[in-house]
Amino acid sequence: MPAFSGEPTDDIAAALGAVPSGAPASEVARRLLDLFTGGSVPAGTRLPPERQLSAALGVGRSAVREALAALEILGIVDVRPGSGTYLRGAASELLPQTLRWGLLIGERNTAQLLELREGLEIFVARLAAARADDAIIARLERSVVRMRDSIDELGAFAKADLDFHHALAEAAGNETLTDHVHVVRSLLQVYADRAVHDPAHAEQAVAEHDAVLAAVRAGDADAAASAMAVHMATATARLLDA
């Protein structure tokens, strides 16, 4: 989409529109994100001052201030004292932060996040089987070896497990899909860190990853998706128990 044609701060304010009366800072942030990810505001654009945003949105300046502070923490805007607030990146670059913000402020249900992760990881495995090159397959093989060698050292085991999934995501070659996977995985990390808590679980996880690897190595997308579905089912059960 083209950049705004008039004075950027005036155009941004006009494009926002009022939010419902009494809307919290989270709703203000949502409205700003909708505009930023629409592609009409170029990276580096200076945003309107708080008072102008407040008037355009129909909320108090404190709600605008809180929303901008949250967006700064997420890396979406850059607040420069004495200069103003600027949009950091282009619309496509804001996607991971936007996803994370939406999930963090929404009603979260761990079981639903786990279901979402299952579907995403299964599709990643399917794509990876069709697209993985020799270098990715070698990385997957090294990760499985490291998992097998660290069954009694669960911290190192978890790192190797994560590296395996990162390599799969890279092989899938779909950055939007990968962003979704990383966001959901990060929100579940507090559980994931405790999911494999004994050598028996680790042994089972190694076997499951080995099955995914074999399917990817063979270029069999259906088998890779099936193997990942088995792994996600047992991993989800362990996470819910944790």
Image (tube, rainbow, N blue to C red):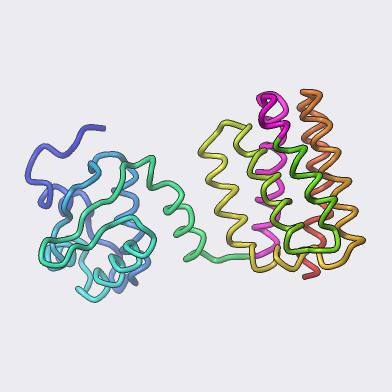
Give the extent of the magenta segment. Answer: 110-138
Taking the view exactly as shown, the residue that stands out farthest to the right is 200
Point out residue 85 in the picture as x, y percentages from the top left corner: 19, 59
181 on left or right of 72: right
On-image quarter of the C terminus = bottom right
Point out residue 145 in the picture as x, y percentages from the top left corner: 81, 44
Residue at 36 percent across and 65 percent down: it is: 73
Residue 98 magenta: no
* Most common SS among magenta residues: helix
Residue 127 magenta: yes
Residue at 43 percent across and 46 percent down: it is: 95
Q: Quadrant of residue 212?
A: top right
67, above or below 120, in the image: below
Q: Nearer the viewer, residue 169 or 133?
A: 133
143 on left or right of 90: right
93 on left or right of 54: right
111, above or below 66, in the image: above
122 on left or right of 67: right
Q: Nearer the viewer, residue 186 or 139?
A: 139
On-image quarter of the N terminus = top left
Q: How many marks?
A: 0
Residue at 28 percent across and 70 percent down: it is: 21
116, above or below 83, in the image: above
Q: Nearer the viewer, residue 8 or 206?
A: 206
Residue at 25 percent across and 39 percent down: it is: 40
Point out residue 165 in the picture as x, y percentages from the top left corner: 68, 45
Q: Quadrant of residue 215?
A: top right
Q: Nearer the viewer, residue 142 or 195?
A: 142
